[in-house]
Image (cartoon, helix red, strand yellow):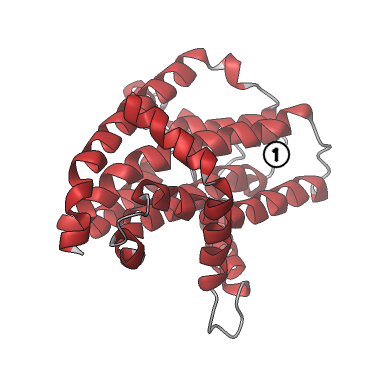
Amino acid sequence: MIYVLSLLKEIIRKRRLIWDLAKADFRKRFVGSYFGVVWMIVQPIVTVTIYFFIFQLGFKSAPPVPGVPYVLWLVPGIVPWFYYSEALNCVTGCLQEYSYLVKKVVFQVEILPVIKLISCLLVHAFFVAIMFVMCLCYGRMPAISWLQVVYYTFAASMLALAIGYFTSAVNVFFKDMAQIVSICLQFGMWLTPIMYDESMFAADYPWIVSVLKVNPFYYIVAGYRDSMLTGSFFWERPRLTIYFWAFTIVIGLIGLKVFKRLRPHFSDVL
């Protein structure tokens, strides 16, 4: 706990440096590209369009929320997943990417995952804005529950950071970790009810619904949809809330412990 508190103090003390490096990291992604930030938009929109044609027009999936078009139900589930998967991938490889900073004795390497996370958060903010605009275009009026998106974004950030401290530290010594994370995220997307609704299993295979809820990201997806579509609040899911934060805290403490133990060897390996 002393290590965790010292890290929090360091993040607060160097918040200006973290913000400047995060903005620089965000700009660096699009340097040398003719279309620049346009590529940030195109890929997610193409992905949503493909799923829309497959599930709504192809499989003719019924809207899980009555009166809500399938695409409007899909977007609040897939937007946080885009953010989480990108953040976890970026955090996992951050020590290699910033190896020149890791080798500096005076630099606090623990802030590198935070820098990457904030950089991804800037992209996520743009897609959240698009999600809001889509809801307005479909005639849905703003509600107080929309503000919960901030809370669930914070929750997704903490989950990515908790896992990311572990994967980034291990990735220095075991380069295959980045590929393992990528594969796990591909499975995770389908193990989370993003394109489909878990109620489709409730009648014949009720145990599948319980298994899906073991995935901590289920809480994030359900929370985004509660916020944007049904108007429910996070305290209406007390068990999931307690489970999610207990899981995130435990994984975060394990990840920080591994990071701290391996940190003295980072510069030698890199």
Q: Nearer the viewer, residue 227 or 58?
A: 227
Element type where label 1 sits in the image: loop
Dividing the picture into quadrants, the one containing residue 122 is bottom right
Kindly tell me whether residue 157 is visible in this rendering: yes
Q: Residue at x 15, y 56 (%)?
A: 173
* Crowd band around label 1 with a 10 angstrom C-alpha radius: few (<14), some (14–19), many (20+): some
Vertical arrangement, residue 129 with respect to residue 145, above or below: below
Residue 45 on image: x %, y %: 60, 63
Q: Vertically, is 230 above or below 262? A: above
Q: In which quarter of the view is residue 205 placed?
A: top left
Quadrant placement of the C terminus: bottom left
On the image, the x and y values in percent for residue 255 come to: 28, 37
Return the residue at label 1: 68
Give, as a three-letter code, the residue at label 1. Answer: Val
Left or right of 246? Residue 30 is right
**Residue drawn 57% across the image and 34% down it:** 152
- Number of labels in the image equals 1
Quick check: can you spot residue 65? no
Say whether residue 113 is left or right of residue 168: right
Nearer to us in this view, 98 or 178: 98
**Residue 248: where, in percent of width, then height?**
38, 29
Residue for point 53% across, 84% down: 32
